[in-house]
Image (cartoon, rainbow, N blue to C red):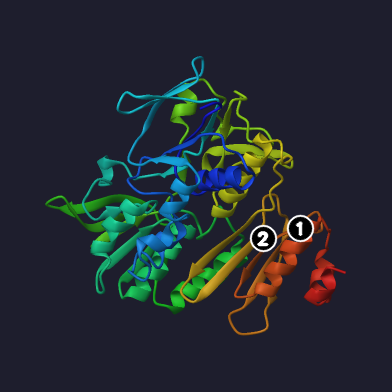
Amino acid sequence: MSDPIVIIGAGQAAAAFAGKLRALGSDRPVTIIGDEPVLPYQRPPLSKKYLVGEATFDRLLLKPPAWYETNAVTVLTGRRAAAIDRTRRVVALDGGEELAYATLVLATGATPRRLPAVIGGDLQGVFTLRDKADADALMADFQPGRRLVVIGGGYIGLETAAVAKTRGLEVTVVELADRILKRVAAAATADLIRDLHKAHGVDILESTAVVRLVGADGRLTGVELMDGRTIAADLAVVGIGVAPNTGLAEASGLAVDDGIVVDQFARSSDPDILAIGDCARFRYEDRLIRLESVQNAFDQGEAAAAALLGEGGAYDPQPWFWSDQYDAKLQIAGLHHGYDDTLTMDGPRPGSHAVWYFSKGSAIAVDALNFPAAFVTAKKLLEAGKHVSRFDVETKPLKELMA
């Protein structure tokens, strides 16, 4: 068994990497190490259809179980990589076994940030939502009439709030910043999403700090705020961001800076070790970034596999994202970092809008709410490298912008 490939992590990036290897005809031995007791699966539905029982877990699997056997890909479920020995090129597992590698792929993902125990973060009824175990635990408490407080007004928190409200829970969102989506979207987009939630009866509290979580007999009963109020709560979901899982990389001496630093071919500071997905930080235009998205995990996983086999070039992402809330779909093309102007465009029907972002007069991104034509147009423009001005967007039909 020559040139074995070991992948640490069993999410979207790992599955994409292994799948691309086999699609390109590689027969190198592949072993995926996953700390969950299940095969690689999709995470976005966890906070949506899976959480409310509308999708069974088998529908979330990225590949059917038979694919791994047919393609000679070994998946070690419920196992944890304990250490990397770069000199000997082996991975030590939690049970003491060692796996030799010629190429090691770190697809370790990220971990939700939690509230500390000293302010009640360890009370029963306080959840994060990142993996199947989180969703399974939350599902039991996700019942109509319960009072849910979502701490954090980012996409995960707002998606959870939407599902909960649809399910019949009473929902309050508490956001420390002066508005929801502060880190990921312009104020115009935040206004649209805030209006959407308020129309469904969600209470959104911005510029509001959580002092502590209040409990009785070890179980959550309320959330105390900085202004002295205490919101009654049967459960809370904490959505205050994630931290990349870089512990193994740091311990083995790899370059780490808010993620495992890689080049355009996903190679870390050790050329025999790649990093892909949420844990990887790479150069995009003039800065280092991490992209926490399913699409990046898939695209970077495939690109890294192709580059390893000499079948592809440098990874040049064209970022896009989406968020489903109630019956609304928000589609995002491009990255808005560095924008200095925005323009809100109304779509063809009520509730459809697009927020265009501009930098130095040129469009760099769009947030399209129930407006797929604007999303598709912006995505094509960005992929083609075409520069479109605010004047063009204001005065021309979407179909003419590509001309």
Pointer 2: residues within 10 angstroms few (<14), some, or many (20+)? many
Against 15, residue 51 (above or below) is: below
Q: CA distance from mark 2 to mark 1?
A: 8 Å
Residue type at numbered disc 1: Leu
- Bin the neighbour count of mark 1 within 10 Å (Cα to Cα): few under 14, some 14-19, many 20 and up: some
In the rendered image, the quadrant that contains the C terminus is bottom right
> Is tag 2's residue or tag 1's residue first in the polypeptide sequence?
2
Judge from the rendering whether residue 254 lies leftward or rightward of residue 110; answer left or right: right
At which x and y percent is residue 132? 35, 53
Q: Quadrant of residue 330?
A: bottom right
Tell me if I can see residue 136 in this picture: yes
Percent position (x, y) of residue 232? Answer: 24, 64
Mark 2 residue element: strand
Q: Quadrant of residue 102?
A: top right
- Most extreme residue toward the right is 403
In this rendered view, identify the residue nearer to me: 271 or 252.
271
Name the mark on residue 333: 2
Q: Position of residue 156 (x, y in %)?
A: 45, 58
Q: Which residue is mark 1?
A: 382
Q: Is residue 232 visible?
A: no
The answer to whether the residue labelled 2 contacts the one labelled 1, judged by CB atoms less than 8 Å apart, is: yes
Horizontal placement of 127 versus 1: left or right? Answer: left
Q: What's under tag 2, amino acid-wise?
A: Ala
